[in-house]
Amino acid sequence: MVAPLIRKLERFGPLPDEGRRALEGLPLAAEPVVADRDLFHEGEHPRHCLLLLAGLACRYKTTEDGRRQILSFHLPGDLLNLTGLLLGQMDHGIGALTPVEVAPVPHATVLDWMENRPRLGLGRLLWRDAMLDAAIWREWVVNVGRRTARRRVAHLLCELALRLRAAGLARGDICDLPVTQSVLADATGLSEVHMSRTLQDLRGAGLIEFGGGTLVVRDWDGLKDAGGFDPRYLHQLAAAA
Amino acid sequence: MVAPLIRKLERFGPLPDEGRRALEGLPLAAEPVVADRDLFHEGEHPRHCLLLLAGLACRYKTTEDGRRQILSFHLPGDLLNLTGLLLGQMDHGIGALTPVEVAPVPHATVLDWMENRPRLGLGRLLWRDAMLDAAIWREWVVNVGRRTARRRVAHLLCELALRLRAAGLARGDICDLPVTQSVLADATGLSEVHMSRTLQDLRGAGLIEFGGGTLVVRDWDGLKDAGGFDPRYLHQLAAAA
DNA sequence: CGTCGTCTTGACCAAAGTCAACGCACGTGG
DNA sequence: CCACGTGCGTTGACTTTGGTCAAGACGACG
């Protein structure tokens, strides 16, 4: 069950055997969660992280006037909520976009890894993982702040295609992306209607197909181009591009 | 010289005496940097962090078509660039917005604090500081993604007023904010012209005064309201609101 | 005194939002 | 097996927000 997490951490650097064994020995109780349920609520003080085993999750915030902004997507293998561990209170929610399986990992366990057991080598790798999330947020600020709808959407799809591929959720250019257009709209700061038009635009240009929970990248170079996508911000993940 | 850094870290939790002594004993060579110069370039592989001693700095990215998006502002006491330490390559630039004083701190030193010397208690505090930056980015995604120009600008000014106050750069509601409107525009994803109009709008509503490098918050509640500002995302910094 | 950077203003334009209607697929219950 | 409802996507007409372009004011500074 921890294999995807281990694979991900090893992208950041070597994982000592002790660390690997610690992860593999972790008692994990998988819990199913139905779609659209919160894994963490904004404002709560969590006492555990969640290892995402299957399904798609997202972080999001809701504005004062009820609009939703999705902050990031999370794939199987992601250890959700180091943020909550370090900051205490959740400043955002984490929700299941699809039916999901998660396994709680107590904060105490993670803190022990990071602070008392340097031989595991987990501290730095987990920290890097958190910093990669931050790198993605920085790019999202640029995306919503300074790009047109077309570039925005193309850019997001590039990022997702790459991450889905790295997580083993794609066969070639065919990616599992079981989300509605309204989810993509909330991730890009666009309206649902305009998302629909923009996707049609990209489809019409022969760059993608999207529907039925699947994204097909028809023309990777064209899509990269349309999005002004430079994968360097994804750091170790960039290789695939 | 490290006093502002220590003050900031202590907001996140108790700093053991060993840690304090380690910081105070740090050999710091202050270097002046003129305004508009880069402290770190996008793409470089830095070998040190920079402790910001005086002046205002910002992180930014430039899009493929040459537009700038400012990602965050940094005030004296900030230890710039834990990101570079952990991710290796810079995915963004860090620039001096005003004349600035910085002191380099080798990566090796910081890594040593964090990984080999748990008694210092610095690891967790620095990590929290990095996570607070991430919390601010999340809010910025919401700000540029889901708020109108007026709310956006009001929100940014609320955040800055609070942070400037916490950093001792404000006397009451009068804050040192020596930046041009074009900088604020790049931080909010607006055009320079529209920033000018929006500031006039806020001025006209009696919420702020802004000019000559100074921000005066005339009506804090009104400004919070106009920005939909809820300081909880600033975590330990929220107290002042 | 002239120049440059910054801010302001006005006129116009383009991008994206809003509102409303409709089609379609899917699942449910009669 | 069909009727119905619901959620999702699409389309069109219209509005709003903010961007763009261009000109001018103002002040700091050489």
Image (cartoon, coloured by chain):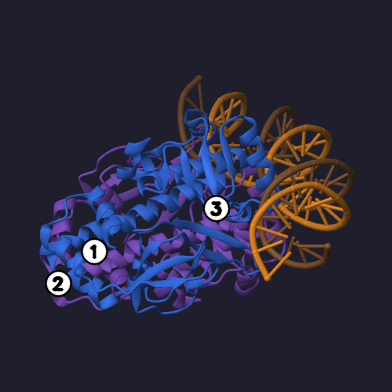
Chain colours: A purple, B blue, C brown, D orange
The vertical placement of A161 against A34, above or below, is below
Residue assigned mark 1: A2
Q: Nearer the viewer, mark 1 or mark 2?
A: 2
The kind of secondary structure element at disc 2 is helix
Residue assigned mark 3: A212
The reply to whether residue A170 is in sight is: no
- Which of these two is toward me, B231 or A82? B231
Residue D22's spot in the image, x, y percent? 87, 56
Residue assigned mark 2: B116
- Which of these two is toward me, A5 or B209? B209
The reply to whether residue A200 is in sight is: yes
Same subunit, tags 1 and 3: yes
* Horizontal arrangement in the rendering, residue A68 relative to residue C1 (left or right): left
| Quadrant location, the N terminus of chain B | bottom left
Q: Amino acid at mark 2?
A: Asn
Q: Residue at x 40, y 47 (%)?
A: B163
- Which of these two is toward me, B202 or B119? B202
Residue B116's spot in the image, x, y percent? 14, 72
Same subunit, tags 3 and 2: no
| Quadrant location, the C terminus of chain B | top left
The vertical placement of B119 against B178, above or below, is below
